[in-house]
Amino acid sequence: MNYLIGDIGNTNIKICKINRNFKIIKTYLFETRSSSLESVFEKKIVKVIKHNTNKRVLFSSVVPKVYKKISKILQRKKMSVFEIKKFNLKKIIKFNIKKYNELGSDRIANSIGAHYKFKTNCIIIDFGTATTFDVIKGKVYDGGVIAPGIKLSIENLFSSTALLPMFKFKKYPKNYGKNTKEALGSGFFWGYEGLINNILRKIIKKNGINFKIILTGGYSSIFKNRLIKRSKIENNITIQGIINIYKYFLL
């Protein structure tokens, strides 16, 4: 028996096929804002669910409209679709925050994935559409920080200025720029390096305990060796969290 789970983010959708041992055997990626998302998704999903797939599908979603569209497609294929916040997740992790309903499903999934895998105090830095920091102390989600996402910041700067060129992160700059693209590279690299490390310092100082630093998302490898503490890249930590929720509530 295989299982189907997914993560619907603001930029990408990740669908994973999981085997009976709850190991990822195949991953499918879709662009969340693609105009052809529904037709592409339906064509692909027909092939995915053909072979011995459990009828229950679990998602983490931060884009309600897209989740609704995908749910309708799956329901037409006789699948039952669930979003993780429909379950009482406080049974598997405690939340020390003011407004649980405002906490994104992706951040909850990250936290549950980190808790189950490492069973220690963790800070998860997710380089997504936003750059998020989530703090796990023991079995408690203790809050976090949301900062602007790197890619979105670059795109916003480009769209808001007439003369600044678009650029891509390539390698860490050793010097400030000698032309506009180099200056932008230095600004974004050094700026985000400072932002990330400053937030880490404040979280660690406030709590006075050791944390395992977990990185996930597209820019993890760029910043891994630039942090004040050693870190570990776990690009499937969100999926691992959804897997744990699936095993707890849907088996």
Image (tube, rainbow, N blue to C red):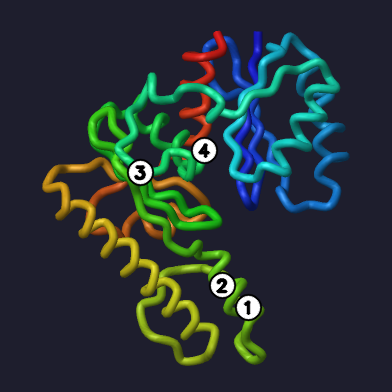
Which residue is labeled 2 in the image? 154
- Measuring 57% from the left and 66% from the top, which residue is drawn there? 152
Could you say where residue 52 lies in the image, as x and y percent from the top left?
Answer: 73, 9
Measured Cα–Cα span from mark 4 to mark 2: 25 Å
Q: Nearer the viewer, mark 4 or mark 2?
A: 4
Q: Nearer the viewer, residue 99 or 198?
A: 99
**Mark 1 and mark 2: Cα distance apart in space:** 7 Å
Q: Is residue 52 above or below residue 72?
A: above
**Which tag is nearer the camera, tag 1 or tag 2?**
2
- Relative to 20, 144 lies left or right: left
Q: Which residue is mark 1?
A: 166
Q: Earlier in the sequence, mark 4 or mark 3?
A: 3
Quick one: label 3 or label 2, which is nearer the N terminus? Answer: 3
Q: Secondary structure at mark 2?
A: helix
Q: Amino acid at mark 2?
A: Ile
C-alpha separation, residue under disc 3 versus residue under disc 2: 32 Å
To which residue does mark 4 refer? 105
